[in-house]
Image: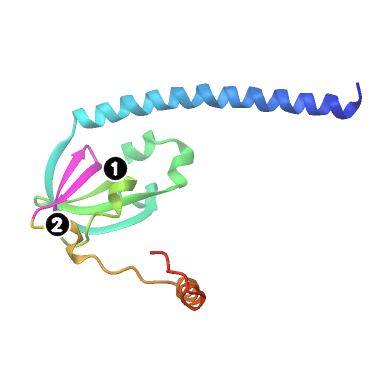
Amino acid sequence: MSTGWIITIIVLVIMIASAIGLYFFGKRTQKKQAEQQEQIEAAAQVVQMLVIDKKKMRLNQAGLPDIVIQQTPKLMRRSKVPIVKAKVGPQVMSFIADAAVFDEIPVKKEVKATVSGIYISKVRGVRGSLNKGAEPVKKSRFQKFKEELQKKAGATPKK
C-alpha cells in the first residue's frame, strides 16, 4: 500500500472515533440537562417583580452572591450571561434569565416571572401583554440597501 492510502485510513479512523465519542458525550450531557430542568421546575415559584434593568454581562460583574460565582466553572465566569435587575417586594435583586426569555422581558415594567432560585425561566405580563412597549427593529444600512436592490430587480423583499 502507498503512504497516501495509509494516511487516508488513519484520518478516517480518527474521524470515526471522534464522532462516536461526541455521540456518547452528547447523550450524557442531554441526560444531565434533563435532570437539571426537572430540578428547576420542581423549585419554581411565580413572583411579581418590577424589572429595573437587563444586560448581558460577565458573572463576576453582575452583582450575584459570591457562592454563585464560586460554584460556576472557571470558563463560564468569563462568558457573558443575561442578567436582570429587578425589585421584588422591597428588595432589589439580580437574576439570571433564560436566553430564550431574556428578549421578552420588558424594562421598567411589572411582570410575573417563574423563578427558581435566581434563575428566571418564564415571564408574563401583569397588565396586558409584554409586547405593547416593544420598539420597532431598526434596519441596518446593509438591510436597506438589500431591500432597494430587491425592489429594483422586481423581487419581493424578505421580512
Task: Assess whether mark 1 and mark 2 are in contact (beta carbons under 8 angstroms).
Answer: no
Res. 65 mark = 1
Q: Residue at x 25, y 27 (%)?
A: 39
Residue at the outermost right position: 2
Left or right: 145 with respect to 101? right
On screen, 91 above or below 52?
A: above
Given residues 147 and 2, the one toward you in this image is: 147
Where residue 88 appears, as percent x and y from the top left, is 13, 49
On screen, 41 above or below 57?
A: above
Q: Amino acid at mark 1?
A: Pro
Q: Quadrant of the C terminus?
A: bottom left
Q: Quadrant of the N terminus?
A: top right
Residue assigned mark 2: 129
Where residue 119 appears, as percent x and y from the top left, is 26, 41
Q: Secondary structure at mark 1?
A: loop
Magenta-tinted stretch: 110-126
Between disc 2 and disc 1, the foreground one is 2
Q: Residues within 10 Å of mark 2 (few under 14, many from 20)?
A: few
Q: Residue at x 22, y 31 (%)?
A: 41
Q: Earlier in the sequence, mark 2 or mark 1?
A: 1
